[in-house]
Amino acid sequence: MAPGRESSLAWMEAGTRLWEATLEALEDHALTAPSLLPGWTRAHVVAHVALNAGALHNLVTWARTGEETPMYASPESRDADIEDLATASAAELRRRSSGDALALAEDVGRLGEEQWEARVRVRQGTQIPASVIPWLRVREVYLHAIDLGAAASDQDLPLDVAAALVGDASRQRSRVEGHPSLVLQELDGQGRWEIGEPAADAVEVSGDVRALAAWVTGRPATLPLTSRGDLPELPAWL
C-alpha cells in the first residue's frame, strides 16, 4: 500500500527541492558525464525526470476528466523522447525540469476529493487510485537525485521517506518469482521487512533505514550496512 496522500504531497514538494538543488549545483558541462544509471548520462536522468512529470500530468488529466490519458504513447516513444531531450542544451534541460515539475504540482493541487479516487493506469499496466500519483513522483525525484552522482546521497533521504521506499520496494520485489529471500532490519528503529519466500537461510541485512532504502532500490549506500550472509545481486527494481 502506498503512503497516504497528504504525506506524499509534502514529500513530493521536499523531494523536488532536493532534485532541483542537486541539479542546480552541477555545471552545464557536467550534465554530459555518466550518471549512476548504466548507459545514461546525467542529461538522460534530467530528461527522464522532466518527461516523468509530463507523464504523471497525463494521469492527473485522466483523473480530472475521466478520459483515458496514458502516461506514454508507447514504450518506444518514451525511450525515444528521453534520448531526444537528453541531447538538448543544458539551459533547455533545466527549463524543462523545473517547468514540468511546477506544472505537475499545480495540476495535482487542483484535484477534488472524488477525482483523487479515480482509477488510472500506470506504465506497467497496474490500476491505481489517483491519490497514489504524488508517491510515484516522490520516488522519482528522491532516487534520481541520487542517480545524478553528484551532491545527493542516501543521507539526504528523510527517514519517513526512506522507510516508505523500503516498504514499497519490498512489496514489489516479493512479487518477483525466485527473488532472493531477504530480511531487512532497521537499526535504532522498528522497521523490519521481508522479501521473497520465508526461508531459514534468508539473508539478513541491517542498517540505517536510509542505507536500506538505497540498497534495496539499487542505489549506492554511503551509510553502513551489515549482513548475515553474502549480499545477493538484486534484480532490477521498476
Image (spheres, helix red, strand yellow):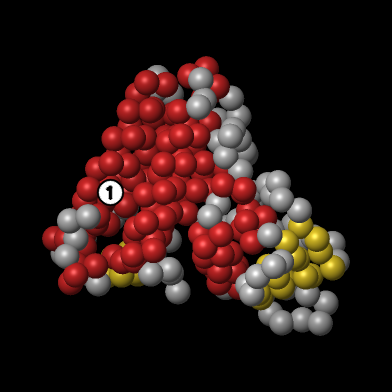
Left or right: where does residue 126 sit relative to residue 229? left
Residue drawn at point x = 50 percent, y = 34 percent: 22
User: Which residue position holds label 1?
Assistant: 105
Seen at 33% across and 28% down, the residue is 95
Q: Is residue 211 visible?
A: yes
- Asked where in the image residue 114 lies, by quadrant, the reply is bottom left
Residue 178 seen: no
Q: Residue at x 83, y 77 (%)?
A: 201
Could you classify mark 1 by the number of other residues whose Cα lies within 10 Å: few (under 14), some (14-19), or many (20 or more)?
some
Above or below, 97 against 5 in this view is above
Q: Nearer the viewer, residue 171 or 149?
A: 149
Secondary structure, mark 1, is: helix
Single out the residue that lies furthest toward the left: 65
Residue 17 in percent (x, y) is at 41, 41
Residue 6, by quadrant, is bottom left
Front one among 157 and 139: 157
Whether residue 25 sits left or right of residue 129 in the image: it is right
Residue depicted at x 45% and y 74%: 1
Horizontal and vertical percent position of residue 45: 49, 37
**Which residue is outermost to the top?**
29
